Amino acid sequence: MQISPEMIDCLRSSRRICALTGAGVSQESGLRTFRDAQTGLWSQYKPEDLATPEAFQRDPKLVWDWYAWRREALKGVRSNAGHFALARMAENLPGFVLVTQNVDGLHRLAGNQQIIELHGNIQRVRCIDGHGTFESWITGEDGIGRCPECGAFLRPDVVWFGEPLPRLEFENAISAARSCDVFLSIGTSGIVQPAASLPYAARNRGAKIIEINLEPTPLTNKADYFLQGRSGEILPALVEAVFGITGAAIEDPRR
Ligand code: OAD
């Protein structure tokens, strides 16, 4: 990892920063990334075969149970230093916009107030017939949630493969990308569209691209700066270098 004075200046002098996060940001909280192999009960399935409208149509119980298992796995999971560092960036930079592909809600738990959740949130469900979105629900005898309005199945309020992103969220994300001076791409493989197009939209309008990832990605050779390593280490180091916020104060701004 190399945080250069030039990169620090670039962040300090920027008026608008747009950050896009992916599953890698939650990896240090103990969550598997999307492309890691699944374990245990679910090891025979690929997420790509469960997170689709067709899978839900074919076997709603299987898909519902997979999300219930993932929600269970989130219990007791805490935000990590990378999430906290992004919350400090948002506080210290008025023009900071956080866009995430993660459905785990860990950015909010870390204190980020305004988050563009491109792929929804696993803690919410919605009626398959469009009668609303809910944060708590009751299940039928088969264990699948039912809409309190019409009795239809509930499904997780997340974006599945082959589905469009929520329109307003994507419009806000693309406009943040097009108007930022610096775009941060953090812990994402950058292969799932249309989220993966955001750094390019920023770059086409002249923004500097900073990428943070354990490994190079398709974006790496287009990035102005590539910080290779764990986001839970690099983001706090960036916040310290740019804002002088150190150690415990990154997790708890009152200190
Ligand atoms: P992926 O699982 O595709 O990629 C995770 C990325 O994080 C990889 O590039 C890793 O190298 C990197 N990584 C892992 N641990 C890291 C760490 N501690 N610090 C920094 N980087 C780390 O996850 P996403 O890119 O988020 O979509 O996947 C994007 C979308 O594809 C997901 O939102 C999901 C999936 O299909 C839907 O469900 C619609």
Image (cartoon, rainbow, N blue to C red):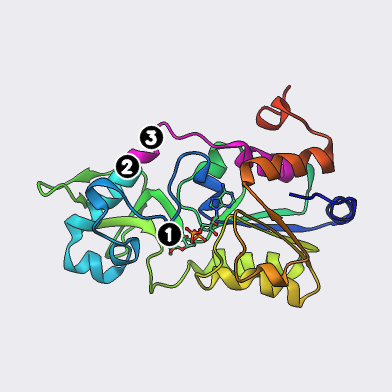
Q: Nearer the viewer, residue 170 or 68?
A: 68
Q: Which mark is residue 136?
A: 2
**Residue 234 placement, left or right of 130:** right
What residue is rendered at 38% in x and 70% in y?
161
Residue assigned mark 1: 35
Q: Nearer the viewer, residue 45 or 69?
A: 45
* Camera-side mark, 1 or 3: 1
Which region shows up in magenta? 72-90
The answer to whether the residue labelled 1 contacts the one labelled 3, judged by CB atoms less than 8 Å apart, is no
Residue 17, compared with residue 168, is above or below; it is above
Q: Residue furthest left?
A: 141
Residue assigned mark 3: 75
Residue 55: image x %, image y %?
24, 67
Q: Is mark 3 within 8 Å of ligand 1?
A: no
Residue 170: image x %, image y %?
56, 68
Q: Secondary structure at mark 3?
A: loop
Whichever of callouts 1 and 3 sits on the residue coming sooner in the sequence is 1
